[in-house]
Amino acid sequence: MDKSSSKTTFRFFPNLKDTYNVKNISPENTKKYSFESANKNLITDEKFPQKKAVMADVDNARILGDSNVILNKDSNACVESIVFNPNVENKVFGSNYLDYFKFENGENKFLSSKNNYFNEAIFIGSNLNFGHWLHNNLAKLIFFDDGEIELPIVINENTPKKYVECLKLIGIKEKNIIYLKAGEVSFFNKLYIPMMPWHVDYEGTLWWIPNSFKTLRKYFAIDRLDHKKELKIFISRNDTTHRRVENEDKIFNELEKMGFIRIIPSKLSIIEQVDLAGRASVVISPCGANSFLFLFMQDSAKLIELSPPHVTMDVTGMFAKKCNLDFRQVIGELSSTENKDPFSLPDSWFIEKNIDRKYVHDHVEFEQSDYNIDLNLILQELNDA
């Protein structure tokens, strides 16, 4: 540990191969781990452009703060395929980045007051959204043999404790977790950097590995569940500030008569979420990170997603079907009387919790208006075998 202050100047390169030592995932897994484009038209036609899954390893690596900026020995970095969206600054630079990253006169600089030193580790990073955490970050571990996962895992210090539970559930011990802190530089003799199994490239194409879901389900032992599918679950978004089902209470009052229970995932541990979802015959969930509870559901269980009219976030169905679930979607209507266009700005900006307001320009999201759902459409899906 070194507490001396320092300034690091670095450059971005567009390609992983130009920046790090890159290798394809083991030959026997090349087909299993092929990326497919999630372009809907291509999926409909069942004609997928593909690319191979790769892993970068870096000798004498440096990670700047709690970001995804990983420097090689020449102070060059690349974020291609290792962040969810390289075109969104906070996805690249992490939390509070304006305090530490300076971009001026054509130079990229990072200001720090402390250095940390480690040997070998695996970088997976973090995300405050549970769905992204599962399928962008945790899912990076599917590329490793069990023995290799004994290496320390690198995540961000602000990773919610419940998300860290996921690591512990799949056998990662607390002593083998390295937490990155904003404003500090972490040095590694060797750092392994898997690609994200679900990510957007510079051109805006969404790529994914369908088998990542199957592997994650094995990690959580979903394939070994012997629970009876006896629960009917309604997931609430009443504790959020955006994209809520405005008539949720009215809907649940009717569903409760049919034996549904209502849960708020944010108030449950990961173990509790795995247990409840694993015993569910049907889950009704508003669109959002909460719907990713589907990862823990047994094969053939029914997932009904309640959704505002949108396009950009319409991925749950593709993913749930790869988990062998019976997926249905019910589209609602935006609540606003002033704005009925789902592709224009919502009525009010949404700012993520615990984010300094000076970063609001990076956290504004489209399609976040509250909406209403027709109960009869839900009942129709429930009755459709």
Image (cartoon, rainbow, N blue to C red):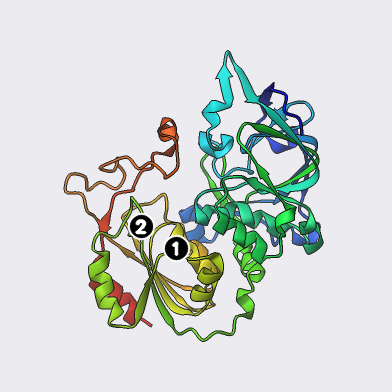
Q: Residue 229 in the image: x percent, y percent? A: 48, 83
Q: Quadrant of the N terminus?
A: top right
Numbered mark located on residue 284 in the image: none
Residue 10 placement, left or right of 120? left
Q: Are marks 1 and 2 in contact (CB under 8 Å)?
A: yes
Q: Quadrant of the C terminus?
A: bottom left
Residue 159 placement, left or right of 26? left
Query: Given the image, on which type of amino acid does mark 2 rest?
Result: Asp
Element type where label 1 sits in the image: helix
Q: Please tell me in which quadrant of the rendered image residue 65 appears.
A: top right
Q: Please tell me in which quadrant of the rendered image residue 282 appears.
A: bottom left
Q: Residue 216 in the image: x percent, y percent? A: 63, 65
Q: Which residue of the protein is positioned furthest toward the left in this rendering?
A: 337
Element type where label 2 sits in the image: loop
As drawn, 301 above or below 16 = below
Judge the density around disc 2: few (<14), some (14-19), many (≥20) Cα neighbours within 10 Å: few
Q: Nearer the viewer, residue 185 or 2?
A: 2
Q: Nearer the viewer, residue 270 or 378?
A: 270
Q: Residue at x 64, y 43 (%)?
A: 82
Residue 130 placement, left or right of 36? left
Q: Is residue 212 visible?
A: yes
Q: Residue at x 41, y 44 (%)?
A: 352
Q: Which residue is mark 2?
A: 239
Q: Which residue is mark 1?
A: 267
- Report the Cα–Cα distance between label 1 and label 2: 10 Å
Judge the density around disc 1: few (<14), some (14-19), many (≥20) Cα neighbours within 10 Å: few
Q: Residue 252 in the image: x percent, y percent? A: 28, 72
Q: Is residue 48 visible?
A: no
